[in-house]
Image (tube, grey):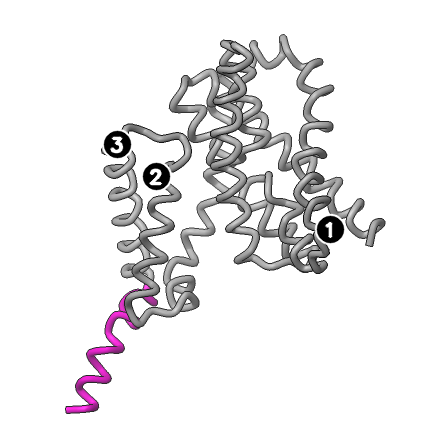
Amino acid sequence: MSELGMSLAALPQAWFATPIGAIALTLAAYFLGVHLFKLLRHPSWCPPVIIAALLIAAVIALLPIGIDDYNRGAAWLMLLLGPATVALAVPLYQQLGQIRALWKPIVLTLPLSATLASCYAVLIAWLLGAPREVLASLAPKSVTSPIALSLTQELGGSTALLMGALMTTGITAIFGVEWLSRWMRIRDQRLIGLALGINGHALGTVRAFEISHQAGAFASLGMSLTGAFTAIVLPLVWHLWA
């Protein structure tokens, strides 16, 4: 009987360690997150992705499932992050005329914005005495996940801490950009979308597409250019500073 009980207890762990189990859990959490997001009347501070992440964390904590088991089962989902990012070229192409008309302000604005987005968190953490691993985990927090994960591994940071920083950054950027745009009476959806993409990476881009297709396209542009700029500059600055 004891062996049977141990076998039954190990079933959830074995199930969620498979791709089918991990994917089923991920999709169920996401669709439930979307439903709760609608019930809460679309709060900008709590997007469906955050709700889904909290639900998955609760399931892993309550059931005998290890985070490593879930990661193994859902590993192939990480492979889709890259193609999903590349697919954002479609809305960019559709707004190519608008982007060409604004290429000068974009080129002048983006390097400074991307630098500030990376530096302010690292500077605060450094002043508070955070160790090198924490600083390396916070430095890529404003770029999209595929690039941020590669940068964190190169810099010697923690993936778990990075993911938390990415979530926090995305939520804060959405709330901050929308609040500032209302306070400053900014109505240009191109500017709002670009700010969401630069500061809020994928979460900000998703929110921008909810505003309009134009805002989403400029958010995709901001996210892509911020990722490319950070991927080139951050390792060089980091190794020189270290």
Q: Is residue 218 magenta?
A: no
Residue 12 locus on image (x, y percent): 26, 70
In this picture, which residue range is highlighted in magenta?
Answer: 1-18
Q: Are marks 3 and 1 in contact (CB under 8 Å)?
A: no
Relative to 69, is 242 above or below?
Answer: above
Q: In the rendered image, which residue does mark 1 sit on?
A: 126
Q: CA distance from mark 3 to mark 1?
A: 39 Å
- Give whichever of discs 2 and 3 has the lower sequence position: 3
Type of the residue with mark 2: Pro
- Give whichever of discs 2 and 1 has the lower sequence position: 2
At label 3, counting other C-alpha atoms closer than 10 Å, the crowd grade (few under 14, some 14-19, many 20 or more) is: few
Q: Quadrant of the C terminus?
A: bottom right
Relative to 240, is 70 above or below?
Answer: below
| Residue 168 vs residue 230, the one in the foreground | 168
Q: In the rendered image, which residue does mark 2 sit on?
A: 48
- Give whichever of discs 3 and 1 has the lower sequence position: 3
Residue at 39%, 44% (x, y): give it.
50
